[in-house]
């Protein structure tokens, strides 16, 4: 049962409440606590990032996983559970070619919203996502 002593509490939209922490452990705890189909999305995102960015740096801040290319270089990607989708933030997404489709109030940020239907064959373009991850990791990261 979510919210018990053994499991993280789910916040609005089903986002897991995970204590701030650095390294793979807190990120894996977040992914394990993602509800339902969203966990599969978290696992796939994490696997792509780890594959495409050797030595990737990870953390959980503000109840969201963050990924960075190298120590001291900031963060290039984060994700967050929303009610009907998982929102992936590319902090320098406006510089990616082509940029992710989701606009932001912040000039440089672009979003990719992944819905449950996207998990069906042909619905989530993992190759495009991997390309965005490689591009984003090569740019200066955001301090957070």
Image (cartoon, helix red, strand yellow):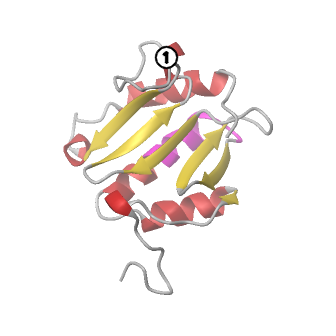
Q: Within the magenta stretch, is there residue 34?
A: no
Identity of the residue drawn at 42% across and 17% down: 99
Judged left or right of residue 23, residue 102 is left
Judged left or right of residue 76, residue 103 is left
Query: Residue 11, how many percent across, how many down?
Result: 40, 65
The main secondary structure of the magenta stretch is: helix
Packing grade of label 1 (10 A; few <14, some 14-19, many >=20) is many
**Residue extending furthest right?**
72
Judged left or right of residue 110, residue 115 is left
Identity of the residue drawn at 58% across and 58% down: 27
Question: Which of the 4 quarters of the picture holds residue 12?
Answer: bottom left
Query: Residue 17, how many percent across, how many down?
Result: 50, 66
Quarter the C terminus occupies: top right
Query: Residue 47, how many percent across, how many down?
Result: 50, 46
Viewer-nearest residue: 78 or 103: 103
Q: Which residues are magenta?
A: 45-55
Quarter the N terminus occupies: bottom left
Query: Residue 113, how many percent across, how many down?
Result: 33, 37
Question: Which of the 4 quarters of the picture holds residue 15?
Answer: bottom left
Q: Label 1: state its secondary structure.
A: helix
Viewer-nearest residue: 11 or 5: 11
Q: Which residue is mark 1?
A: 94
**Residue extending furthest front?**
105
Identity of the residue drawn at 51% across and 62% down: 30
Q: Is residue 72 above or below residue 139?
A: below
**Residue extending furthest bottom?**
5
């Amino acid at each position: 049962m979510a919210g018990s002593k053994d499991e993280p509490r789910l916040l609005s939209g089903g986002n897991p409440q995970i204590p701030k922490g650095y390294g793979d452990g807190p990120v894996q705890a977040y992914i394990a606590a993602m509800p339902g189909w969203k966990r599969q999305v978290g696992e796939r995102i994490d696997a792509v990032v780890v594959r495409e960015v050797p030595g990737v740096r990870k953390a959980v801040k503000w109840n969201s996983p963050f990924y960075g290319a190298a120590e001291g270089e900031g963060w290039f990607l984060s994700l967050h559970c929303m009610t009907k989708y998982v929102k992936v933030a590319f902090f320098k997404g406006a510089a990616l070619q082509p940029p992710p489709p989701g606009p932001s109030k912040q000039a440089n940020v672009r979003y990719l919203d992944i819905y449950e239907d996207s998990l069906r064959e042909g619905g989530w373009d993992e190759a495009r996502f991997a390309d965005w991850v490689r591009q984003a990791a090569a740019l200066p990261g955001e301090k957070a």
